[in-house]
Structure formats: structure tokens, C-alpha cells
Image (tube, rainbow, N blue to C red):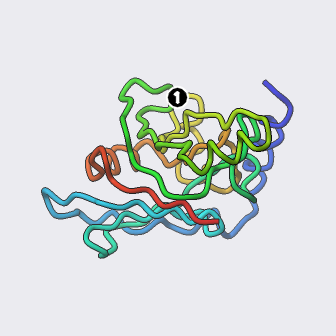
Amino acid sequence: MRRPLFCAILTMIVLLIFSPAGTRAMQGHLALPTGLRADTILIEKSAHLLTLYCDGQKIKSYRVALGRKPLGAKVREGDMRTPEGRYRIDFRNDQSRFHRALHISYPNAHDRRQARNQGVSPGSGIMIHGLGEQFAWLGRYHHLVDWTEGCIAVTDEEIEEIWSLVPDGAGVVILP
């Protein structure tokens, strides 16, 4: 196991044991109306929060883990940052190693131009995904440490719900 990932997992375990944040519950497990569809996903990196909206009305929020370097926008491949900007869900992967995954249309034109100006590749493969078998043991505490390579992670149960609520083409806004 790579040292940074090991350190992140060890930190998470310590936080789980000693942090009052570890005992806070997620938004309740209320049944959502049948047929409800989200048209926008808002991700607030500073709050570690993903919120689904339909016609401007909040549907539900989820705590998220981000890239290992959560401050600042993604600039290049391998920088471990989560992008910032406006995107779309452009396809889904039900065979993801992280259970299920919704692909975000990163890089957009602005991201490509910024990377080109710096002479680097912007990267790709930014997803909203579950934990998968490797990280399932973290469960609802997964968000206490940013551990992804730039993706947005929720629990497997949450990605199932998000998967059913978010159609391809839904807007994604990622804020600092």
C-alpha cells in the first residue's frame, strides 16, 4: 500500500475513534418520492457536501470525500485535486471498482485551455462513485479524510440512491 494512502487511512481510523464528527448522522433515510429526478448536482468542496436539486429545489445532501489535495481546482493529470467548474454527467459505469460511478464531463473547454497553457495534460476520469469493496469498511465515515485521486466519493448505499435519481445529462456544479 502506498504511504500517503496508508497515512490517510490511519488518520481516518484515529478520527473515527476520537472525533465527535464521527458520530454525526447523515441526513435521515427518508423515502424519496417515486419518479423524482435530479437535474443538478451541486458539490461544495469546502463543505464536503454533494446536494441534488430538481427545478431549484433541494432533494437531498450527502457528505463526500474528495481528492487527496482538496484545496484548489484540478489543473493537471495526477495532481490529486477535484476539479471546479460546470460539467455534466455524461455516462455511467455500473462495473466500477468503486461499486457504481457517474462520470463527470471533466475536462471542459476552460480546463483544457488552462492545461494547454501550462503544457500539461488536464487528466480525465473524474467520477462520483461509491466505496467499493476496498473501502467499504469505512462506511459513513469515509468523508473524514480526503482519499480519492480527484473523484467525489459517497457510500455504496448513497451512490445507489444518486444513481437512481440522476439521469445522464444532469448538470454538475463544483464550487471551491
In this view, the residue in front, 163 or 139, is 163
On the image, the x and y values in percent for residue 62 come to 46, 61
**Does 172 appear above or below 105?**
below
In this view, the residue in front, 107 or 9, is 107
Q: Quadrant of the C terminus?
A: bottom right
Number of dots carrying numbers:
1
The amino acid type of the residue labelled 1 equals Glu
**Does 67 appear above or below 131?**
below
Q: Quadrant of the N terminus?
A: top right
Q: Residue furthest left?
A: 34
On the image, the x and y values in percent for residue 110 come to 59, 51
In this view, the residue in front, 103 or 76, is 76
On the image, the x and y values in percent for residue 173 come to 48, 61
On the image, the x and y values in percent for residue 84 come to 60, 57
Q: Is residue 30 left or right of residue 50?
A: left
Q: Is residue 78 left or right of residue 44?
A: right
Q: Residue at x 70, y 48 (%)?
A: 114
Q: Is residue 133 left or right of residue 144?
A: left
Near mark 1 (Cα within 10 A), the count class, few <14, some 14-19 or many ≥20, is few
Q: Residue at x 71, y 42 (%)?
A: 115
Q: Secondary structure at mark 1?
A: helix
Q: Residue at x 56, y 69 (%)?
A: 24
Mark 1 highlights which residue? 133
Q: Residue at x 50, y 67 (%)?
A: 25
